[in-house]
Amino acid sequence: MSTFNIAVIKGDGIGPEVTASAMNVLTKIGERFNHKFNFTESVCGGCAYDKYGEPLPKESLDICLASDSVLLGAVGGPQYDNLPYELRPERALLGVRKAMQLYANLRPAKMFEALKSVCPLKNPKNIDIMVVRELIGGIYFGEKGVRDGKMGREGYDVMAYGELEIERICRTAFELAQKRRGKVSSVDKANVLKTSGVWRKVVHEIHEDYPDVQLEDVLVDNMAMQLVREPSQFDVVVTGNLFGDILSDLASQCVGSIGILPSASINETTRGLYEPIHGSAPTIAGKNIANPIATILSAAMMLKYAFNLMEEGDAIESAVEKTLNSGARTADLREEGHEVLGTREMTDLIIKNI
Ligand code: NAD
């Protein structure tokens, strides 16, 4: 029997409900495939601020750093909106990502056949995109501040990318493409930004090591258009932090609800952070109506990427697909003629299908 130690950040809002679902699913996988998953809670986010006066206490970070991988629900809520920047719940996330050096954020946007009708696009073809977003560099981490400028108060944020940062994220993208359909679309704004000019050069230099992968450059404004026009043309999309933040949300909406989309934040080691792309959805928290699928699929990504348990990860994905095919829906996927299940009931059905 193999044992895996997982740090669990339940976080705020619907976080505790959806992480409970994912933990139950992992426990079922452990029973079926003879693995032991040990869960240790790491208190982070708004709840950590309430309890300890800071969003990422050292002890919580140490639990993450000592684990084999981290499962996260979501952090944040309106009661924390007016806190100073360094005490906001989101700082916990940035802190964990930075401390674990998780530079690659993988966000798959895959269309479930059963959910084609909730897709906002008119004629969705098979959408299966993997957005690879650089996560710990670029404008979000550059020098920033407010100063007196010619036009009055002036806010500034510096965007910079170094060769090595670009190299490691695009290697992640090329290697993923080799296991998928062999195409990488690199997104930049090279017609205007110096940062993008260097980005594009480095991506092409590294591409020489991956002759089996097709590479195209797409300007970010065109990418936004193409994602809505014909998302099925994309396989792996690699881009920087800011563009990736926006485009991955856009890609996710092409396949339906935010409640079904997982993500992984990884580096070259096996340890990573696995979380749904949605936030803490405070208005539906504690009501047993949140969709647990995004967090359950994040657990499936953890099995595959962190623990190399491919069959086990596939078992979760198939169970989710089977459950959706049977017509079960949570409130966010509500469709006429379909029974609406609560968070716990949906989780139980998925577990039954494993
Ligand atoms: P959100 O993702 O929490 O909610 C957006 C909309 O989607 C809401 O209508 C919500 O009810 C719905 N929704 C989200 N997840 C759902 C689920 N699993 N099932 C059903 N419906 C779901 O985004 P927001 O409202 O912009 O942010 C709320 C809080 O979450 C804010 O404090 C924000 O800072 C935080 N946030 C956290 C993360 C994170 O922890 N990674 C990410 C985004 C936002």
Image: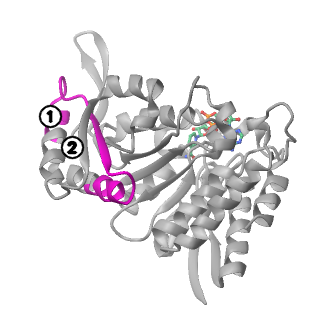
On the picture, is 56 further left or further right than 15? Answer: left
Residue 203 in sight from this viewpoint: yes
- Residue under the image location 44 percent in, 32 percent down: 246
The earlier-in-sequence mark between 1 and 2 is: 2
List the residue tagged with mark 1: 197
Classify residue 48 as left or right of residue 70: right
Which image quadrant: the N terminus? bottom right
User: What is the residue that sits farthest to the top in this orientation?
Assistant: 151
Q: Which residue type carries mark 1? A: Gly
Question: Callout 2: helix, strand or loop?
Answer: loop
Look at the numbered disc 1 and say if its residue's Cβ is closer than 8 Å to ligand 1.
no
Q: Nearer the viewer, mark 1 or mark 2?
A: 1
Secondary structure of residue under mark 1? helix
Image quarter hosting the C terminus = bottom right
Residue positioned 40% across, 36% down in the render: 233
| Mark 2 residue crowding within 10 angstroms, few (<14) / some (14–19) / many (20+) | some
Q: Which residues fall within the magenta stretch?
A: 171-198
Give 165 or 309, whichever is nearer the viewer: 309
Tell me, yes or no, whether the highlighted magenta stretch contains residue 178.
Answer: yes
Q: Which residue is mark 2?
A: 161
The question of residue 199 being in magenta is answered with no
Q: Residue at x 47, y 70 (%)?
A: 306
Quarter containing ligand 1? top right
Q: Nearer the viewer, residue 215 or 153?
A: 215
